[in-house]
Each structure stands twice: as structure tokens, then as C-alpha cells.
Image: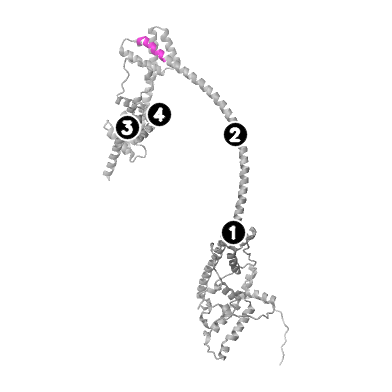
Amino acid sequence: SHALTSASTLCQVEPVGRWFEAFVKRRNRNASASFQELEDKKELSEGSEDEELQLEEFSLKTLDPKDWKNQDHYAVLGLGHVRYKATQRQIKAAHKAMVLKHHPDKRKAAGEPIKEGDNDYFTCITKAYEMLSDPVKRRAFNSVDPTFDNSVPSKSEAKDNFFEVFSPVFERNSRWSNKKNVPKLGDMNSSFEDVDAFYSFWYNFDSWREFSYLDEEEKEKAECRDERRWIEKQNRATRAQRKKEEMNRIRTLVDNAYSCDPRIKKFKEEEKAKKEAEKKAKAEAKRKEQEAKEKQRQAELEAARLAKEKEEEEVRQQALLAKKEKDIQKKAIKKERQKLRNSCKTWNHFSDNEAERVKMMEEVEKLCDRLELASLQCLNETLTSSTKEVGKAALEKQIEEINEQIRKEKEEAEARMRQASKNAEKSTGGSGNGSKNWSEDDLQLLIKAVNLFPAGTNSRWEVIANYMNIHSSSGVKRTAKDVIGKAKSLQKLDPHQKDDINKKAFDKFKKEHGVVPQADNATPSERFEGPCTDFTPWTTEEQKLLEQALKTYPVNTPERWEKIAEAVPGRTKKDCMKRYKELVEMVKAKKAAQEQVLNASRAKK
């Protein structure tokens, strides 16, 4: 025979399959992902171990070989007291000891009955060694170690002994970290940087714990590729959910620790005190700055006040001079007016006829109202220094000029009114009989109705039209469209035209209330120069005071109207009672108009 000899060759071996995947993970994470690597280093450093391996007793006969996945593999091999800290050498030695003691052949030789196939409990020993000898499978089993305490202390548990409660919990959970050098919880003397680094690490905790061991189905049992993919998809979803729950557990642990940590409270109080000190220093600096500014501002205000007082004094002196001049002019005008009246009275108003004398008196009053001081002085000088005929001629000439002026103003106002009426008729388009033939009484009634029913009144223009149809004496029936058109045209009038309409309305009011003109032989005096209280229109302020007084003094109040009159300055008891009756009649008319429109609308429905 020929001996075949060959030179020994050196081959480079590279990791493939799941070993290559573990190699890549170790390189990328710079952390150990394989228990085999740890065990090899440990075995190299420790060398040979002569120490005898101590195994825990475990009742293997109670195990169900079909339920091997739910068994405690460490306890099966007698390593329940060592668990994840057991080395690969210890696992091998424990398995060897279990095989020598519980192998079916050994037991059969001893006369023990043996179950056939995989029904014997020795299958559990084989499965335990298979899981723990493989680094990937061992990591999967360690991730769901049934003896690991997953509990998280509550805030109330660590109220008085924070470090004693949370230190062992963080130590226990640090085994899941992918990163080495896991920071410790520390104590009350730990610096702010150490505490901040600790919580930063745990809030960004990188866990290698995974839950593939709890997969309900194994894809190798699938009959086809599609079924394998479906099983793998279901397992991935379940693992992701459990991983999420695990990270929530870690986050809850860190949150509870952070909220109970007395050092955090101390740091916050120190930070708060520091900020308060800074704030106080800023406030003090700002206060001093404000005081300086306030002093400067007060100085400027004082200077401005003095300048303003000087200016106001000058203005006051000028106002006093102007007032004196105005008072002098008023007195002079009043004197000249009285002089004119006396001169005319001296000449018996230049007539022997009583009616002519009354008419002359009216004309003289017109002159007193319209003539300026210079004209009055010139006229009085003429009357004083001339004869009766010359004085009468000068007076009549002046009266004629004033009457001509009044006539021209009246014609201009009437022309403006006619033009406004034409414009209103054009704008409304001549809508039947209701848009024409608006008399002065109807215009005044329309103005009264518009003020009586302000904007916001329900069916306002129908109510106004109905009110006019009830109270109008012309007999013309107005519609809401007619009223709207005429109201818009009145709004377009200039102020002079509106004043004329209001003046006519007030003249009609005086006539209806029986205002008697002055007697023919009455002599003008100062007591007729002011307005008569009984016929002075009520102002808005007086109206408010009257309404408030009516509320303050109800019907059963003794001497009610005397008290109401006292509450409204310038008005007598009679004025207040008369105004109250007018308001009552106005409210009744308003309600009647609204009810009629409401009934008409209901009848239509």
C-alpha cells in the first residue's frame, strides 16, 4: 500500500449563517451579542477549573416531554441556582452528569421501565441542553427567564427609602443593556452631572431583550413557503408588541424613580433659588434704573407743569379780557335794544291805531333780534337826533330791509323743500297714491313714527305704516314701501330743510296745546326773553331722570309727583305729570300698531 502524504495548508475560516449575523451585530454595536464569546474569554482567563460542580436536585420524572418548551431548562440541568451566569463549561458538565445518571440505557440496565421514543423524560434533558448550548437560543430563553422579577416599584413604596427600593431594581434590569458600563443609581451625594447621565442613559435605554422564545408557531412546521411567511409575519407582530410593552415597563420604572428621586427635588430647589437670586438682582438693578428715570421724569414734569401753568395763566388772562369785551358788547347791545324800544315807545310806536302799534312792536322786536350793535347805535342816533317823521322813515326803511331778508330766506327754504320733494318722488318711482300727496302733517307724523319705532322693531316699516294710517287725518293709506321711500328721501335733506320741518312740527305742537300769543298791549320785557318752561321740549337727560324717578317712587309713594319733580331739575309737578301721560299714550299707540300688524300677519298664515 502506498501512504499518501500531503503538505499541511493554512485555511482562513470566516463566519457564515447565523454566526456571521452575530458577528456583524457585535461589530456594529460594539457590545457582546453572544454568550459563547463571553464564556470563551472567561474560560481562557480562568484556565482549568478543578472545582467540583454543584448541581441542584430536580424532580425530572414530573416533567411532560411534550411540554418541554414551558420547562425551566436551568433547573432541568441542575443549574437553577446559577442560571444566566452559568458558563458553557458548567452547562456541558451538568449535561454530562445528567446523561450518566438519567440516560435510558443506564436506567434500563438498572431494571427501570423505559417509555418508548420521545415520551421519556430524558427528552427534557436533551431539549434543555439544546437550548442552553446554543448562544442564540439561550439568549431567547434568558429574555423570558421565568424567575426574573419584572415588577416596577410604585411612587408610594419609595417615599421614605428611595435608594433601598430602586437600586436593586436598576441593577436587576441592567442585564438587558446592549451597552457596557451601565451607570449606577448612586446616593444623595451624587453630583448633578452623574444624576443627569444616569437618567439620560435609562431614558434612552437600549435593550437586547427579545421574545422569539414565546412564538406560538414554528415556521419550520409549515407545509409551504406562503404558510411560513404568514407564521413569520404573525410572530414578528407579536414580538414587536411584547418589545413595546417591555420598553413601556422600563419607561415607567425610570419615570417613577425620577419623580421620587430626592436629589432631583434638591437640584430643582437649588436651581429655583439660583433663579430667584438672579431675578432679585435684576429686579434691584431695574428698580434703581427706574428710580433714576422717575427722578428725571419728575424733573421734566415739573418743568412742563411750570411752563403749562404760565401758558394757562396767559390764556386765562386773554380769556378774561375777551369775556370782558364780550360782556361789554352784550351790555351795549342790550342797552341799545332797550333804547330802541324806549324811543319807539316815546313816539307811541309812530301810530294812533292800536293794531298798527302792535304790529310795529313786533317789527321792532325783529330789529332787536337781527341787527348788530353798529346798526342799532346808528338807528338810535337817528331816532334821538331827528324829528318824528325822519325817525319813522329810518325805522321803516330798516324794517323793510329786515323783512326782505327774512322773505328771501323763507323762499330759499321753500325752494329747497320743493326740490327735495321732487327728488324723493323720482327716487321712489311714483309708486301709486301712497308716494305722493305728503302733507306737512303726514311728514311730521312720519318723523314721529320713525323715532317711536327705532331700528330693531319687529316688522318695523309695516308697524310705522299702520301707525300712520291710524293717526293720519289725510285719509291716504300708506304701505310699507311708501313709508320706506319717503323716509329715505327725508334722510337726504340738508340740515336747513330738516330744521324747517322740525320747526313746523313744534309750531303745530304749540298751537294744539293752546299757546296764547302776547296781548296786543303787552310791553316786551326780559321775562319773555327766556323759553317758557311749559313748552320747552324734553331733553334726553331729563327723560332719563324722569324714568329713573318713576322707578324710584312707585305708585303707592306718598306725595309721589312732588318727589319726582324734585328729581328732575327745571321741571314742575305739572310738567312731569303731563310728560308721563304723553309717554303712556305713545306706548299704547305703539303696542296697538304692533298688535295690528301681528294679527294681519297671522291672518295671512
In the image, what residue type sits under mark 2?
Answer: Gln
Give the distance between the C-alpha atoms of the residues marked 3 and 1, in whole angstroms. 77 Å
Marks 3/1 in contact by CB < 8 Å: the verdict is no
Residue 558: numbered disc = 3
Residue 345, magenta (yes or no): yes
Q: Is residue 98 above or below residue 395?
A: below
In the image: residue 467, left or right of residue 127? left
Give the mark nearest the N terminus, 2 or 4.
2
Q: For mark 1, what is the residue? A: 262
In the image, what residue type sits under mark 1?
Answer: Pro
Q: For mark 2, what is the residue? A: 298
Give the mark nearest the N terminus, 3 or 1.
1
Marks 4/1 in contact by CB < 8 Å: the verdict is no
Under circle 2, the secondary element is helix
Q: Nearer the viewer, mark 1 or mark 2?
A: 1
Q: Can residue 250 be seen here?
A: yes
Under circle 3, the secondary element is loop
Q: Can residue 439 be seen here?
A: no
In the image: residue 448, left or right of residue 258? left
Residue 495: numbered disc = 4
Give the mark nearest the N terminus, 2 or 3.
2
Magenta stretch, main secondary structure, is helix
Q: Quadrant of residue 48?
A: bottom right
What residue span does the magenta drawing correspond to?
Answer: 337-348
Q: Nearer the viewer, residue 454 or 587?
A: 587
